[in-house]
C-alpha cells in the first residue's frame, strides 16, 4: 500500500497544531462548506454529517490521500451551540454555561481515497464550567476568543481558566480527538507513527 498524503479539511489553527504536535504534518484546506444547509437536532448526528460534508467538499482536489474533516458543537440544556454570532450572544451563552455542565461533540470523518473507504465517528467530552462573575465573562468576550470557538470557549486558551474539569478526551474539546484519530487510522490499516516521517 502506497503511503497517502494527510489532508486536513479545516482552517482551524487549533486542529492543525494538534496534528503537528502529534507528529502529523497535514496539508490544510478550508472546506468552505455551508453548514446552514444541515438542519439536524441531534448533536452527535449533526457533527458527524458536517465532518463528512467538509471532507467530501475537498475530496475532488486530491488523489490517493487521507482526508480528515471535523466539526464541533456544544450541547447544553438540550440546546446545540456552535460559534456565537456576536458578543451579545457570547455574553448570554456564558451566563447560561457558568456553573453548569455541557457536552462537547466533535465529529471526525476520515476518507481514504486509495482504499475507497471512509470512517465517521464522534468524540464526546463532558465539560464542567466554573461559576464565574459577570466581569470575567465581559472581559473574556472582549478578548474575542469565544467568538471564534464552538461552544464559546477555547480550552487551550484563556477559556481554560473557566473550565473546572473534563470527563473524556481533552484534545476532543480543542477540536480533534487524537486517540479517536489513532483508532480510525488503525481501522484503515495504518500505523499512526508512519505519519511521523
Image (tube, grey):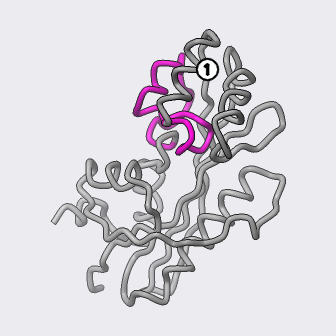
Residue 114 point in image, percent of width and height: 40, 87
The residue under label 1 is 129
Q: Where does residue 12 sit, x and y in percent of width and height? A: 44, 55
Locate the C terminus by quadrant. Answer: bottom left
Taking the spot 76% from the left edge, 70% from the top edge, the residue there is 37
Q: In the picture shown, does residue 50 fall above or below 181? A: below
Q: Between 10 and 63, which is closer to the camera in this rendering?
A: 10
In which quadrant of the rendered image does the N terminus lie?
bottom left
Is residue 163 shown left or right of residue 66? right
Residue at the image position 73 percent from the left and 58 percent from the top: 46
Magenta span: 145-172
In x, y percent, where is residue 190? 34, 69
Residue sitting nearer the eye, 128 or 36: 36
Image coordinates for residue 96, horizontal then vertical, percent: 75, 23
Instruction: Let me know if residue 168 is in the magenta part.
Output: yes
Question: Residue 152, located in which quarter of the rendered image?
Answer: top right
Question: Which residue is painted at 28% across and 50% down in the image?
Answer: 22
Q: Is residue 102 above or below residue 43?
A: above
Left or right for 6, reference 81: left
Amino acid at each position: 500500500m502506497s503511503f497517502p498524503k494527510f489532508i486536513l479539511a479545516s482552517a482551524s489553527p487549533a486542529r492543525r497544531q494538534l496534528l503537528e504536535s502529534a507528529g502529523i504534518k497535514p496539508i490544510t484546506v478550508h472546506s468552505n462548506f455551508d453548514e446552514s444547509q444541515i438542519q439536524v437536532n441531534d448533536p452527535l448526528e449533526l457533527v458527524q454529517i458536517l465532518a463528512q460534508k467538509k471532507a467530501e467538499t475537498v475530496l475532488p482536489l486530491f488523489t490517493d490521500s487521507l482526508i480528515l474533516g471535523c466539526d464541533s458543537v456544544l450541547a447544553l440544556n438540550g440546546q446545540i451551540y456552535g460559534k456565537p454570532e456576536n458578543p451579545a450572544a457570547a455574553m448570554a451563552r456564558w451566563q447560561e454555561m457558568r456553573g453548569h455542565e455541557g457536552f462537547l461533540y466533535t465529529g471526525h470523518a476520515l476518507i481514504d481515497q486509495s482504499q475507497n473507504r471512509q470512517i465517521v465517528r464522534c468524540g464526546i467530552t463532558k465539560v464542567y464550567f466554573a461559576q464565574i462573575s459577570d466581569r470575567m465573562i465581559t472581559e473574556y468576550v472582549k478578548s474575542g476568543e469565544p467568538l471564534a470557538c464552538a461552544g464559546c470557549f477555547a480550552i487551550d486558551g484563556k477559556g481554560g481558566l473557566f473550565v473546572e474539569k473534563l470527563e473524556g478526551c481533552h484534545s476532543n474539546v480543542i477540536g480533534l480527538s487524537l486517540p479517536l484519530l489513532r483508532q480510525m487510522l488503525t481501522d484503515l490499516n495504518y500505523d499512526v507513527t508512519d505519519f511521523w516521517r
